[in-house]
Amino acid sequence: MAEVFEGSPEVVVVRNKQVIFKDYVNGYPKESDMVVTSDATVRLELPKNEDGQVLLKNLYLSCDPYMRGRMSKRLEGSYTPPFTPGLVCIDHLL
């Protein structure tokens, strides 16, 4: 449930579900390799007077094949940096 932040309807604070890997993953990732939490919040601000801009909510997290390489320690020749164990996994919404 969103709550109004600073009394402005254009700015809200919402719960933010996070996936955190405990350590680098060996083999296929298992539920025991990660922690999923909804304890964090994030401040969302609607775009102001900008034509064509919208604020989107991500409903699903896709675990794409390229992410597998990010779950391991950096491999020689890898084109993406690894996730850092104990920190939130950062990805992009398309």
Image (cartoon, rainbow, N blue to C red):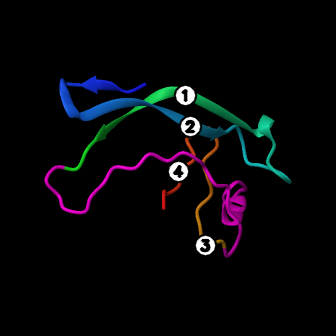
Q: Do the residues labelled 2 and 1 touch (CB within 8 Å)?
A: yes
Look at mark 3 in the image and give the residue it sits on.
Answer: 79
Q: For label 1, count other residues whose C-alpha is less than 10 Å away and answer few (under 14), some (14-19) or many (20+).
A: few
Task: State the SS at label 4.
Answer: loop
Q: Which of 76 and 1 is in front in this view?
A: 1
Q: Position of residue 40 (x, y in %)?
A: 47, 28
Q: For label 3, count other residues whose C-alpha is less than 10 Å away and answer few (under 14), some (14-19) or many (20+).
A: few
Q: Which residue lies furthest to the bottom in this view?
A: 77
In terms of sequence position, does the residue under pointer 4 or pointer 1 come before the other?
A: 1
Q: Which of marks 3 and 1 is in front?
A: 1
Disc 1 residue type (three-letter) = Ser
In terms of sequence position, does the residue under pointer 2 or pointer 1 come before the other?
A: 2
Task: State the SS at label 3.
Answer: loop
Q: For label 4, count other residues whose C-alpha is less than 10 Å away and answer few (under 14), some (14-19) or many (20+).
A: few
Residue appearing at x 76%, y 39% in the figure = 33
Look at mark 2 in the image and give the residue it sits on.
Answer: 18
Q: Give the range drawn in magenta.
A: 48-77
For the image shown, how many numbered marks are present on the structure?
A: 4
In terms of sequence position, does the residue under pointer 3 or pointer 1 come before the other?
A: 1
Q: Are marks 3 and 1 in contact (CB under 8 Å)?
A: no
Q: Nearer the viewer, mark 3 or mark 4?
A: 4
Disc 2 residue type (three-letter) = Gln
Q: Is residue 60 left or right of residue 48?
A: right
